Image: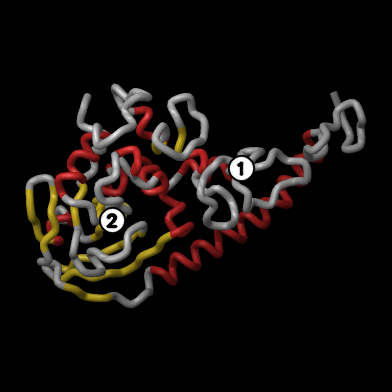
Amino acid sequence: MTTTPDDPTTALPGRPPVVDLATWQAARDELLVREKAHTREGDAIAAARRRLPMVEFDGTVEIVGPDGPVPFLDLFQGREELVVYKHMWYDGAPHQGQCEGCTTTAWHLDDAVYLNARGVSFAVLTTGRPDEVASYVEFMGYTQPWYSVRDVEAPVGGDMGHITCFLRDGDRVFLTYSTTGRGNEPVNGSLSLLDMTPYGRREGWEDNPEGWPKAPQVGSPVGGHGAPICWYWRSDADGNAAWGPTSRPVPQWTRPGATPVETLGRQGHHH
């Protein structure tokens, strides 16, 4: 059936106009021009990123992994490049109380085989105590190596919630790049796909068509751009966005044996 933008039989209140395929293709092609410009600018930024100056530091500084202290150099696993994610940590918090944003980022980076194939190693760093970190990694079922950088100075330690890149030349180690906040988004492929969907991320800061569904409001801290950021990354057992003793970062509900009652204390190692 052929429709026109002002056809009252097909128009949907609070939605973009309903059109025929040719009209849609013309609008899509117009947007593609902007998308290609965005891609080219991203390429230019990446080129500038590769030309940033480097900072050399002592690669023998010790961090604590699952088998005890190791020099930072070991994280390269013999490769020349290393990407780390610096996972925020709340001392003494139950496993379900760890950062939902960091949890989601780490979940999306649980398999680094494609990075490894391009000569890049990957690891997760955090300021948590080694015993707490080991218990949490077991609870989540993470397969990537996690290391405690507690009391280690930057650029190995320091502020968490960052993606940081390093280069090795023999035994010399260099900091090349670091980003945080929305700079971490490339790791999370789910966000890129949500940006392509009709409703987007459904966060309050987005510019949506008039009448579009509003971002759900929950009794949560409001952060970022005036929206309950990550509201959909923390939920109760029924999938309802929630903050508090009955909620946890949503990846944790997918682990084997997750139960609604496992919400008090550090019970993550009960399987």
Residue 23's quadrant in the figure?
Answer: top right
Between 5 and 119, the one nearer to me in the picture: 5
Secondary structure under tag 1 reads: loop
Give the residue type at disc 1.
Arg
Q: Residue at x 63, y 49 (%)?
A: 204
Mark 1–mark 2 CB contact (< 8 Å): no
Residue 240 appears at what percent x and percent y?
A: 52, 30
In the picture provided, is 11 more to the left or to the right than 27? Answer: right
Q: Quickly name the residue at label 2.
A: 84
Q: Residue at x 10, y 66 (%)?
A: 60
Residue 96 appears at what percent x and percent y?
A: 34, 38
Secondary structure under tag 2 reads: strand
Residue 236 appears at what percent x and percent y?
A: 45, 30
In the displayed structure, 256 sits above or below 53; it is above
In the displayed structure, 202 sits above or below 89; it is above
Q: Residue at x 30, y 51 (%)?
A: 90
Give the residue type at disc 2.
Val
Q: Residue at x 45, y 59 (%)?
A: 181
Q: Quickly name the residue at label 1.
A: 202
